[in-house]
Image (tube, rainbow, N blue to C red):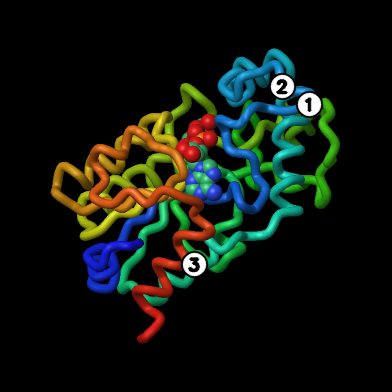
Amino acid sequence: MISAKLIDLLKQAKHLVILTGAGVSAESGIPTFRDALTGLWENYDASQLACEEGFLADPALVWGWYEWRRHRVLNAQPNPAHTTIAKLAKRIPKLTLITQNVDDLHERAGSGDVLHLHGSLNHPRCIKCGAPYQHLEATPVGCESRIDPPNCSVCNGLVRPGVVWFGERLPAEQWDLSKEACKTCELMMIVGTSGMVWPAAELPYLAERLDVPIIQINPTDTSFNIIAKFNLCGKAGEILPKLYEEAFSDL
Ligand code: APR
């Protein structure tokens, strides 16, 4: 049962911030980070592959992992969680969507101005000169295999995935805009993140310190449970449409 207070806060919100993690894409068939890695990568922890050292140690293994993930995303569809978030943006005067995900499912569901804290699978760049790489394979390899990364057309350096790796700084503009939004919103929603990766995990605490009510949607408990005013235990693709229906269906 969703509380009437929560529905009222959603209906009255002038500025809602939504922070999403891998859980929002889980019902699209995209594995979350803490799910066990499969196949070629099953003996690795994501943090061993999602870092510059891991890439330089075995570029084909890491590039192959990202191309396999890009293939998964290309063949996936936005789920009701993504589409409901896009619909909410049409009902709430201001909605700031911040994601830790590197897929483009929010955009494909109709969300605009998504703040990607951890980069994107679709924007690789040269590891040496930083030049964007524009010639990604239209249909990446779907099988779990090593794939030699391409070379930069400017300096011939290795092309790396356009994601933020462990130990790397977040994109400054997205990070600053995200912090500012969490400090000025009236309501915050955390959808499908374990809150295990910093500094992204700091954002809900910025809101909480200013007494901004927080709604969390997640089938399992996280460290955010103690700061969330509303903990909705379940799948985002099921809960978000219900929230939308109860808050905006009669408008
Ligand atoms: N709906 C909502 N939440 C879900 C669902 C679902 N259908 N399925 C799983 N979850 C929750 C899990 O319970 C978990 O708390 O999504 C969360 C996913 O957590 P992680 O796999 O840790 O992913 P995330 O929090 O996004 O990781 C953050 O870590 O590895 C880095 O850069 C990577 O962006 C990633 C960051």
Which amino acid, mark 3?
Thr
Q: CA distance from mark 2 to mark 3?
A: 33 Å
The location of residue 181, given as percent across then percent down, is 28, 53
- Residue matched to label 1: 39
- Residue matched to label 3: 84
- Residue matched to label 2: 42
Direction bottom: furthest residue: 251
Direction front: furthest residue: 1
Which amino acid, mark 2?
Glu
| Left or right placement of residue 233 versus residue 60 in this view | left
Asked whether 100 or 58 is in front, the reply is 100
Residue at 22%, 47% (x, y): give it. Answer: 207
Which amino acid, mark 1?
Gly
Q: CA distance from mark 1 to mark 3?
A: 33 Å
**Decide: marks 2, 1 in contact (CB < 8 A)?**
yes
Counting residues from the start of the chain, the first of labels 2 and 3 encountered is 2
Q: Is residue 22 visible in this depiction of the protein? A: no
Counting residues from the start of the chain, the first of labels 1 and 3 encountered is 1
The crowding category of the residue bearing disc 2, from other C-alpha atoms within 10 Å (few below 14, some 14 to 19, many at least 20), is: few
The correct choice, above or below, for 147 with respect to 246 in the image is above
The crowding category of the residue bearing disc 1, from other C-alpha atoms within 10 Å (few below 14, some 14 to 19, many at least 20), is: few
Q: Quadrant of the C terminus?
A: bottom left
Asked whether 36 or 22 is in front, the reply is 36
Direction left: furthest residue: 210
Image quarter for residue 88?
A: bottom left
The correct choice, above or below, for 219 with respect to 197 in the image is below
